[in-house]
Image (cartoon, rainbow, N blue to C red):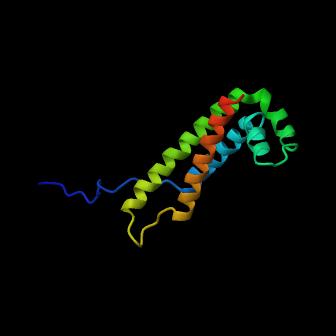
Amino acid sequence: MAEVSFVDRSLPAPPAKASGSALLTLGGLAAAFGVAACCALPLLLISLGLSTAWLGEVASVAAPNRAPLLAFAALALAGGAILLWRQQRHAANCGPNGVCAPLAVRVLTLVGLIVGVLLLIAGYLYA
């Protein structure tokens, strides 16, 4: 006699929480800010006519730890991007009554990722 299974294996994986990608992006953004604080940010802010005196303290703390900050920022931003990609993929399949990460959170996470990557590149190139 054939056995009947009630387990549906075609269900998609549970969605990635919005807080995971947002926290990784925020951590990567903070680390990229620390890397860019010594050289790239002062140049950018001075060209915009803004004061950079407050960046001296951030740069003095971040400069000795530049390599670990670069690595952490790259890993955190990559992790945030992967989780955001999973959220976007799940949101495409999520119906009107489904549980998905809100669009505003996904957009802010994407903007944070873009700014973080730009800061990371600037901090790497101008140091």
Could you tell me how many numbered marks the image carries?
Answer: 0
Relative to 41, is 6 on the left or the right?
Answer: left
Split into 4 quadrants, where in the image is the C terminus? top right
Report the residue at 33% width, 57% height from top.
Answer: 11
Q: From the viewer's perspective, is residue 61 above or below residue 109?
A: above
Split into 4 quadrants, where in the image is the N terminus? bottom left
Outermost residue to the bottom: 97
Report the residue at 51% width, 64% height from top.
Answer: 103
Report the residue at 46% width, 49% height from top.
Answer: 85
Q: From the viewer's perspective, is residue 78 above or below residue 48?
A: above
Q: Is residue 14 visible?
A: no
Q: Is residue 110 visible?
A: yes
- Of residue 3 and residue 103, the one placed in the foreground of this image is 103
Residue 81: x %, y % from top left: 52, 45
Outermost residue to the left: 1
Residue 20: x %, y % from top left: 57, 51
Residue 46: x %, y % from top left: 79, 43
Relative to 66, is 91 on the left or the right?
Answer: left
Residue 37: x %, y % from top left: 76, 38
- Of residue 19 and residue 14, the one placed in the foreground of this image is 19
* Residue 44 image-quadrant placement: top right
Q: From the viewer's perspective, is residue 124 above or below residue 44?
A: above
Report the residue at 26% width, 60% height from top.
Answer: 6
Q: From the viewer's perspective, is residue 80 above or below residue 94?
A: above
